[in-house]
Amino acid sequence: MSKIAERSANPADVESIEAIIAAAYDVISGPAGKKRDWKRERSLFISGARLIPTAKAVTNDQGQVSDSNNLAPQILDVDAYIARVEPYFATIGFYEKEIARRVEQFGQIAHVWSTYESRHDPNDAEPFMRGINSIQLFNDGSRWWILSIYWQHESPSTRFRKSTFKVETGGSADASSPSAPAVADGCRGNTWSPDPKRMQR
């Protein structure tokens, strides 16, 4: 494993699995035009970490998106992710929150299935987007680090099961955190949204 970068973090953000997941959602949420705390964002991720949206492929240097319904992982480092979302956050409100979680932990490594909802305003009655984050974590003995976040939005052909939102007591090594299955029916689906302002987060 590569050497862990020295990145100063608020201890409250990284003291537990629940804390670092909450911080990851909180730091990207806010009203249109509000600059996010990217120093805080970077402090959550280990050196070399990746953020991986599952989306339609970009086919050329001008950013043209493929007409195909096939999806592909877009592998970004933290700075590339920030560059990707900053123009969107500058003009459109974006609030994302976790609604279900399943944690699997062995020793110092953990995997989290985290189901989310996204809104343009926290008071919106319905989310414009839902999806699932697959998050890998590592504890170095003093704090938790995010190694990767890999996600896919819900789509007409990839829908959540009702059981996605049922809280379970098993399957989590962190007894203090809510544990719920975060599994979608099927593995294939076209990214889709009824909202024309929707972003490819």
Image (cartoon, rainbow, N blue to C red):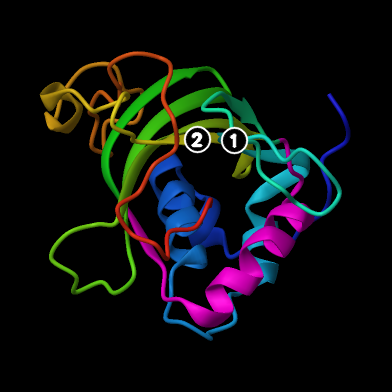
Name the disc covering residue 67, or none: 1
Q: Nearer the viewer, mark 2 or mark 1?
A: 1
> Residue at left 57%, top 80%?
90
Q: In this view, does 40 lie to the left or right of 106?
A: right
Q: Position of residue 173 (x, y in %)?
A: 36, 23
Q: Position of residue 57 (x, y in %)?
A: 67, 35
Relative to 62, is 182 above or below?
Answer: above
Name the disc covering residue 190, or none: none
| Residue at the disc numbered 2 | 151
How many C-alpha atoms fall within 10 Å of the one at disc 2: few (<14), some, or many (≥20)? many
Examine the image and state in which quarter residue 164 appears.
Answer: top left
> Residue at left 43%, top 18%?
188
- Taking the magenta stretch, the answer to whether it contains residue 92 is yes
Relative to 123, is 5 above or below?
Answer: above
Q: What residue type is labelled 2?
A: Trp
Relative to 96, is 112 above or below?
Answer: above
Instruction: Give the Cα distance between marks 2 and 1.
Output: 21 Å
Identify which residue, 34 or 135, lies in the foreground.
34
Examine the image and state in which quarter residue 139 appears.
Answer: top right
Q: Which amino acid does label 1 sit on?
A: Asp
- Taking the magenta stretch, the answer to whether it contains residue 152 is no
Identify which residue, 79 or 66, lies in the foreground.
66
Q: In this view, does 3 lie to the left or right of 13?
A: right
Label 2 residue SS = strand
Q: Position of residue 1 (x, y in %)?
A: 83, 24
Q: Is residue 105 left or right of residue 168?
A: right
Label 1 residue SS = loop
State the residue lying farthest toward the front. Answer: 67
Which residues fall within the magenta stretch?
75-97
How many C-alpha atoms fall within 10 Å of the one at disc 1: few (<14), some, or many (≥20)? few
